[in-house]
Every structure is written in C-alpha cells, then in structure tokens.
Image (tube, grey):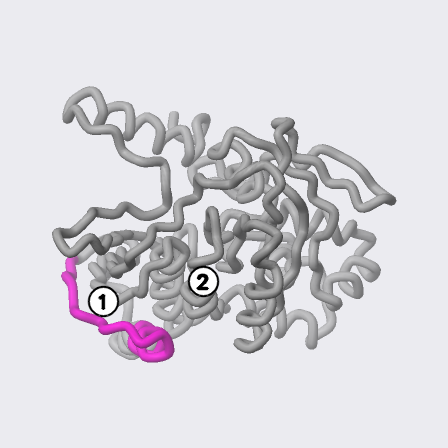
Amino acid sequence: MLSELGERKVIEIIHNIIEKRLDFKPDFDDSVFVKLPSSDYLVLHTDVLNESTDFVEEMGFYNFGWKAVISNLSDVACKGAKPLGILFSFSIPNKINLDNFEKMVKGICDACKENDVIYLGGDTSSSNELSIAGFTFGITKRIVKRKGAKVGDLVGVTGKFGLNSIAYEILFKKIKSDETIKDLSLANLFKPKGRIKEALMISSFLNCCMDISDGLAISLNQLCELNGLGAKIFNIPIHEKVYEFCEMNNLDPLELSLYKGGEEYEILFCFEEKYLEDIRNILTSLGCEFNVIGKVTKEKKLIYDDGKRSFIIENRGWEHFKKWL
C-alpha cells in the first residue's frame, strides 16, 4: 500500500522505473530543467492541489486558486528562474457552483498578476473531486539545485515559523485560540505570499535552495540527505504569536514549529559566509525577514543546539500518502 511508503518513496520508485525502462536518470529535484541552444536553462515544474488533502471550507475557493499558483511558482523561483507562464488543468465535480468556480479562477489570476506571470490557459474535465494541476516554466542562466551545499556554508531561511502549525492545530485538533491568533494563522496558511522575487534576487549568491512546503524539519533533513552532509542548527525563527498560543495550550513552540507546519513556501538555502551581507541587504530591501539558522557540517547529523537545548532533528512532519509522521 502506498500509505505504508510515503511520497518520497513513491517518487523514488517512479524514478527507478524511468531509469530502467527509458534509459534516463531523473534528477531528484523539485523542478526539471533543459539546456537551450542559447545556453539558458528552461525550468519546468508541475504541482497539484486536491480538495481532499489541500482544501478546507474555511479556506474559500479564492484562496484555493491563489495557493495553486504560489505552490507552482515557488519551486521554479527557487531554481533561480523567473516564472514566465502557467497553465492549469481543472478536474471539477458537478457539485461546484459557478460562483465558487469563478472565485477560484479570480484567485489564480490575482496571484499571477501579483507575481508578473501570464496565465496561459489549460484544460478542464469532470471528476468526483476538485483538483487543480498547475504547470509552470521559467528561464535562467544559472540553475540553483537542492544539491550543492558545501561544508562550512551558512544555512538561511526567510520568514518566521509556527503560524501554519497553529492553523493546523486549530483546524484539525480543534484547539482553541483567541481570534487575533486564529485569524493571523489561518490567513498565513490559506493565502501564502511565496518568496518568488526574493528567491530570484539572491539566487546568484546561493549554493543550493529549496522551498519549505512539507515543514521545516523534513526540508532540513532533505537538504542534508541530498547533499550527503549534516548541519548544526542553532536558531529557529518563531513568530511571536506562537509563544503566546503555546503558553495558552501547554505546547512546545520549537516542537510545533519544526514538526507540525507545512506549506509555508518560505525558502531554505545554503551560501558562503562572504555573501551574508549581500543577501541580508537584498532581503531587507524587499521587507523580507531573514535569519541564519545554522551551518553545514561534514558529519552527517542534523543537530539542533542553541546552547540550552540539544537534540537530533527528526525527519518527520507532513508527507503525502502517510500524512503526518
């Protein structure tokens, strides 16, 4: 059963079959790229949102459309490519009324406009479940892969963590919260900003980069595994409202932010220390929160140690087919 394997194992199986039957070895990255005669790279990416796994009633159809765009653009931008266009294939059940469908398409259009991307069209079909499959592409002269980190590199992230974790606790565990925290966390989950411009502006300084869509702990573990290295993490930037929520509900802010989040669409990247001020200045000019959270190590262990607490960061969080690990 796929539920016993999880998404990453399923992807590995697909890659193995492709390699054996088509004599082609796919790259384990979040987008694919092709070198053009001009020496530029064409970067391609597809991502799908399904009603059963990615939509709740509180989200609304406008935000569902918006999020479908961000989830696609984010991976292309993290490769250093400017997203140019996007297509969507809709699988639509008869139960969806016209007003909600129009709201979804408006969300798609507004997210495209916000990020200077052309919505080129796509396909529609009927289905038992609402599904939005996006396909986007971009161009770059230099690819920033997920693999490329070096021992001694600094590990950086945009944004602060924990708000999406709160949203999941409220939605799925029905944990109570005051209205301010509830509204803030749900808005952060349902309508992510994405870091499209930020990823592009700093790409020339990065050795590797990926977006954070499966939660911080899983993303950090993926980064280490793909690069065959480890990391010592000493700082997790946690949103101030997370501490307030955790105090009210007797929860650990660090545990919550590491393992219970997902779909933040912040970016995680490694870079040489000499580029620290360049990156900081660019992100600050864009009004983007930026933190150095650790350093890449030769020892293949992912350790959190802030001088007060020390532990191995486990490879758990959200994973399709398995869901929460």
Residue range highlighted in magenta: 108-125
Q: Is residue 320 magenta?
A: no
Give the residue at x 12% y 52%.
37
| Residue 232 in the image, given as x and y percentages of width and height | 69, 39
| Residue 54 in the image, given as x and y percentages of width and height | 42, 55
Give the residue at x 16% y 24%.
23
Give the residue at x 43% y 43%.
146
Q: Nearer the viewer, residue 82 or 313?
A: 82
Residue positioned most to the right: 308
| Residue 2 in the image, given as x and y percentages of width and height | 38, 29
Mark found first going from the N terminus, 1 or 2: 1
In this rendering, position of residue 302 left or right of residue 324:
right
In what element is the residue under mark 2?
helix
| Residue 79 in the image, given as x and y percentages of width and height | 37, 53
Q: Nearer the viewer, mark 1 or mark 2?
A: 2
Residue that badge 2 annotates: 199
In this rendering, position of residue 310 left or right of residue 33:
right
Residue that badge 1 annotates: 85
Tell me the quarter of the picture where residue 316 sits: top right
In this rendering, position of residue 131 left or right of residue 287:
left
Tell me the quarter of the picture where residue 42 sits: bottom left
Q: Is residue 118 magenta?
A: yes
Question: What is the three-letter code of the residue carrying label 2?
Answer: Ala
Quarter of the rendering occupied by the C terminus: top right
Q: Nearer the viewer, residue 126 or 150?
A: 150
**Neighbour class for label 1 at 10 Å: few (<14), some, many (≥20)?**
some
